Amino acid sequence: MRIEGNTYTAEVTKDERLLVDAESHTPAAIAVHKQNAYSVPFEQDAGAVTADFFYLKNTSNLSLHIYRLKLSTPTLDNEVDVKTGVTGDPTAGTAIVPVNLYTGGKAADVTCEGKDGDMALVGGNVVTRLLLDKDFLGEQVWNWEAPIILPTNTAMVLHCILDPTADIDGTLYFFLEND
């Protein structure tokens, strides 16, 4: 069937339903091709009563979208809060460099730190509480269909609240994109 006044043609079924050939990609997959998708592997031992053991601050002019987090704890069951909007500077953290998922791609314009102990950040809001089971085989994975978004100059932490002596290994995945 030809649509009047248009140079495009479209096929329809006998019930006059349009036949469409479409492709869909997740925002993270699109960001990989733009060299703006990253992973951040880390291994921390919180080591304090309660502890902000992982810190990520968006210092770019793009929004930072956290879409996946993998965690495991080989030693003790634990609870971890994902908190956004924290303030202050991390106390004695060690820099962690995010890896671009587009091999050889550009570096992320973020500040990322980890610490075996508390980084003493303040405020923020708990987005979600994650329960870690030491007996779970492999990593526990959280995929957010609606990503956690950090606007420019906003920070987040992973905050251990149950047993700070537990080792916590993980990988956080994010991409940067225009609003």
Image: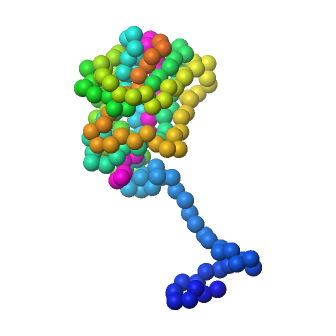
Q: Is residue 34 left or right of residue 92?
A: right
The image quadrant that residue 171 belongs to is: top left
Name the residue rendered at 27%, 24% in the picture: 90
Q: Quadrant of residue 112?
A: top left
> In the depicted view, which residue is nearer to us: 79 or 45?
79
**3 above or below 22?**
below
Q: How is the image coloured?
A: rainbow
On screen, residue 121 versus residue 43, left or right, reads: left
Q: How many marks?
A: 0
Is 119 in the magenta? no
The answer to whether one can see residue 70 in this image is yes
In the rendered image, residue 169 lying in the magenta stretch gets the answer yes
Q: Is residue 96 left or right of residue 5?
A: left
Q: Can you give x and y, in whole percent of width and height, for residue 53 in the image?
A: 37, 22
Q: Name the residue rendered at 26%, 20% in the picture.
A: 91
Determine whether 106 is above or below 162 in the image: below
Q: Can you say whether 161 is above or below 125 in the image? A: above
Q: Specify the quadrant that holds the N terminus.
A: bottom right
Looking at the picture, how far across and down is residue 77, in whole percent?
55, 16
Residue 109 visible from this viewpoint: no
What percent of the width, then of the height, locates residue 156?
36, 31
Residue at 40% in and 35% down: 40
**Predominant secondary structure, magenta span:** strand
Q: Determine which quarter of the picture holds residue 16.
A: bottom right
Residue 4: where, in percent of width, then height? 56, 89
Q: Residue furthest right?
A: 14
Looking at the picture, tell me which residue is in the foreground, 48 or 152.
152
Q: Residue at x 35, y 28 (%)?
A: 124
Magenta part of the chain: 164-179
